[in-house]
Amino acid sequence: MGKETILVVDDQPEVLRSIERLLKPEWNVRTAAGGAEALDWLKTGDPAVILCDQRMPAMTGVEFLERSLEARPDAVRILITAYADLEATVDAVNRGKIYAYVAKPWEPDDLALLVRRAADRHRLAAENRRLAAELAEANERLRTENLHLRRTAVESSRFENIVGHGPRMLEVFKLVSKVLDGPTTVLLLGETGTGKELLARAIHFNGPRKDKPFVAQNCGALPDTLLESELFGHVRGAFTGAVRDKKGLFELADGGTIFLDEIADTSPALQTRLLRVLQDGEVRPVGGTKTVRTDTRVIAATNKDLDAERKAGRFREDLFYRLNVFPVRLPPLRERREDMPDLIGHFVRKCSAKLGRPVKPVSAHAERLLRAADWPGNVRELENEIERAVTMAGDEKVIEPRHLSPRFLLSAGESVEPGSLKESVEALEKKMIAASLTRCGNNVSRAAAELGLSRLGLYKKIERYKISS
């Protein structure tokens, strides 16, 4: 970093020379014999500190320093004054025009120290301005990113993005359309992987609360004590590790929507607290004594038969009726096979974009195998299978049955010799490795990537099964 510049203004040449000798070892020093000369230099010069005598002909030091504000407002100003001028000087300092004053006669060491402090002040102010500008830029970038993420969330949560044109899904869409505009509590029922959270997001982002937060919590993913803190917040000292107050999801989602997945997995104690929120619209943080009002729409979901849980005494009856205001059941994939072609095409496009691969068609044979499967994991399982197939297909032009999981190869008519399950699996594994090596021109690295194995792992299997190139 270069030396800062100190501007010294005085009508006495011997004073200018004296101050220049004092300051020059540490700074660049520019001298001016009066206010007019100094103002002319300030049109292009940028000093860190201006040091000026008060008693000068034509223009006093205070007058010059006030006029210098327009040209260089960031410079730090010091006035050299005689005892008789102290009243005017103090008035100028009090008005904020001058950083400090030096009374004549001044001590060289004291003057050098004051200039050093003034230069440090200028440097600190410049650093603060730089940081403030960076913070403003970061805030603007964050605001832009938040707007982009919100638009992306809204776009991805449109009902058009929930694939399904069969009668079962059309009935779901028709039912949900009735509850978009109000605060009604919704209960989504369905097996794992049927798209309950996707539908919850669509309800939120297509309703009047879309500009407010949407927060989701899997109630089966956390222990009861942590879940209680996550939902309702806690105050400092409520438990070991609570070093500061923390807002809960209900408070963070105020004005918006909270999605409580796997609601049937909550404990009786937590069910009691959830009931109080639904009844009163108030939450009390863990360890706190005050309640917080919250206007939060609740969408709950479960893959269990909640009515059966209620009858068995595992779920509070009063909470069940609070949640079961507007139940919507999502059908499993096996009950909406007519949507399979659209779902397969949708996931091929989605996974190809995710993996950076060109979109390729699925052969009729492979599609028939996919449509005939049971899919206990429903739509989520289908998406995972398609991502695997897109990965396995690599540079090939069409997704074929051989790119699917081994269970589909058996369905495709691969013969399995009689024998133990272990022998059958080994025979199939050997056949798949040999076929992959052939497709990859005996390139072990490519074949390993296609099979989802490490290069060393594939070499071990080639040696084990005595597969020749």
Image (tube, rainbow, N blue to C red):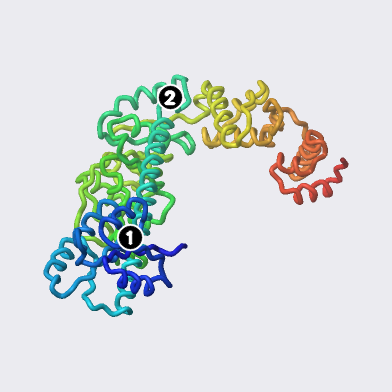
Is the residue 208 above or below the residue 243 in the image?
above
- The correct choice, above or below, for 314 with respect to 48 in the image is above
Image quarter where the C terminus lies is top right
- Which label sits on residue 160? 2
Pointer 2 with pointer 1, Cβ within 8 A: no
In the rendered view, does 464 fall on the left or right side of 370?
right
Q: Give the mark toward the camera: 2 or 1.
A: 1
Q: Is residue 208 above or below residue 246?
A: above
> SS of the residue at dot 1?
helix
Judged from this view, the residue extending furthest toward the right is: 468
In this rendering, position of residue 231 left or right of residue 288: right
Secondary structure found at label 2: helix
**Which quadrant holds residue 97?**
bottom left
Q: Nearer the viewer, residue 15 or 336?
A: 15
- Sequence-wise, the earlier of marks 2 and 1 is 1
Image side of residue 99 versus residue 415, left or right: left
Query: Within 10 angstroms of label 2, few (less than 14), some, or many (20 or more) residues?
Result: few
Amino acid marked by disc 2: Glu
As shown in the figure, which amino acid type bears the numbered disc 1? Ala
Residue that badge 1 annotates: 125
